[in-house]
Image: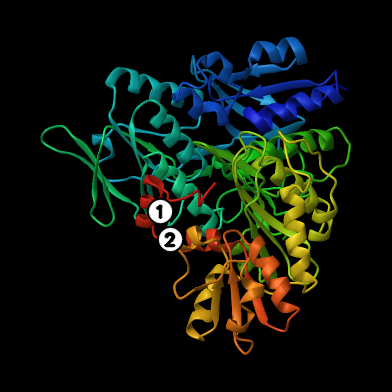
Amino acid sequence: MTKKIVVIGGVAGGASTAARYRRLDEFAEIIILERGSFVSFANCGLPYYVGGVIQDKENLELVTPEMFQDRFNIDVRINTEALFIDRENKKVEVSNLINDSKYNLEYDTLVLSPGAEPIRPPFKGMEEVPVFTLRTIPDTLKITEHIEKHQPKKATVVGGGFIGLEMAENLHEKGIEVTIIELMDQVMITLDREMAQYVHFELYRNEIELILGDGVDSFERNETGQASVITQSGRKFPTDLVVLAIGVRPESKLAKESGLELGKRGHILVNKQMQTSDPNIYAVGDAVEVTNFITQKRITIPLAGPANKQGRIAANNIAGKTEEYEGVLAAAVVKVFDITVSQVGLNEKDLKSNEIEYEKVYLHPMNHSGYYPGADKLALKVLFEKNTGKVLGAQVLGGSGAEKRIDVISTIIHFGGTVFDLEKLELTYAPPFGSARDPVNMAGYIATNIIKQDVKIIHWHDISSIQQNEGLILDVRRDDEFELGTIEGAKHFSEFEIRSRLDEIPKDERICLCCQEGFRAYIVQRNLSQRGYKVCNLVGGYKTYKMATASQEELKEMAKNPPFRIIF
């Protein structure tokens, strides 16, 4: 008997489910219902069409309905909306949005991939200002057409997440002055704040106006016709264009009205086989609630990679191949002007909320051999379980290859690996691509030294305890580095003077050693600890401390005329 599969929604989750199921069952009838005009398109590429990096809009549509028909014999019905699911009779009420005709469609198995919609709060005065969201190809075309027609001079992006940052960059590339307004005290809330500071620096370096800790209150247009955004603190920012990038909410109305179980925030609940509370209905993508791979707690992650994997697993289970979705690690990457921002696993906020005992390391290695032209710095943070060394998360920012290191660490996390595995990994090396000691290995070396107690450490946020308890902060950098800035109250010995000035270093005080990035202080720490001194090393060095503690005004000044390459 021929099986009938109906998929509601295309793009990553729905399209991958349909295509995978066809590969497993050549004879099934497969129908995709897509409310929009495009069934499979590059969501993540949309900001780059606005910026002109992607110039042909045809490149945004990955697979057309005709291609689905010709290659997979899948019936794709665009501009078609599913109105109601009759679960008892296994039928879907469908509306053709072109001619407004309605009909019922029977199914054996139904797959929901409705996705998510941009959050659009009812701000006062929204009708006075050109306000856009970005989720689909038509959204992109509306923005580009507005820019071409009205030639805006100023744009405001509300929200500092992935889409907000990408839109800020691409509007800037069009010659538009951009202001980002973010309610939180940092952009990219999935990063720990001290790591987000590198993103703040890069935005300031590219003359993006960044407003943190101050959300939007309303919009207005004055008597001269000038539109403005007014923040909750009362500040007013003139603008010609507004892009809302606050986040997304699940398109789960159809599931709710059909009586399927939903999570607290309205996402569709599924088991590890991607089945909903109705065994004949599966759900995948941005609208579903899954589990975090590490904590096994419920989580929602609107990312294309997980959606594709969920679609494949759903298709396998529909075809009788039992397979489970193990959970999401939230591996992600975004380009912010000249830096790559990548992350995976849990951040410190997650670890604290889950009451997990953890430790962390910071380092600033080159992305490839320093003597080979074009080398750039990376800022790397790895979080791991305090006693076992099990890797729990990582954040890497900087030049090319940041995402490569996150991919390696993501693999380690997936297989339950530890920092001891990081130091032992054999990774490729040639001067244009890496170093003989890869940054991933280096993170492992530092972390294992901490676990083995070969080095005692202190973090940037604990420096005040040294200062308050009259301990000694010893800066062992070069004279020229020290003169450009140091930790308040620090005493300065160059690393090369240590052996000749031992009598000036007190043995009865706690000593915190500081260099630029951590390595030179570690060398001095090994020397002094063997001589009986009570020493600890500032992890990540002055660079991490400075970035973590800098105010936004200080970052702006550093970005205008950095005295040295403190960032990358």
> Which of the pair 328/315 is nearer the observer?
328
- Looking at numbered disc 2 in the image, what kind of residue is underneath it? Ala
The residue that label 2 is drawn on is: 550
- Residue 150 left/right relative to 336: left
Q: Which of marks 2 and 1 is nearer the N terminus?
A: 2
Which quadrant is home to the N terminus? top right
Q: Regarding mark 1 in the picture, which secondary structure is present there?
A: helix
- Looking at numbered disc 1 in the image, what kind of residue is underneath it? Leu
Which of the 4 image quadrants contains residue 522?
A: bottom right
> Which of the pair 25/376 is nearer the observer?
376
> Which of the pair 143/558 is nearer the observer?
558
Outermost residue on the left side: it is 223
Q: Which mark is residue 555?
A: 1
Position in image of residue 408 (x %, y %): 76, 45
Above or below, 121 against 524 in this view is: above
- Residue 541 left/right relative to 394: left
Position in image of residue 422 (x %, y %): 80, 54
Q: Is mark 2 in CB contact (under 8 Å) with mark 1?
A: yes
Within 10 Å of disc 2 (Cα), the crowding (few <14, some 14-19, many 20+) is some
**Residue 403 appearing in the image:** yes
Residue lying at 83% horizontally and 60% vertically, measured from the top left? 420
Position in image of residue 286 (x %, y %): 61, 41
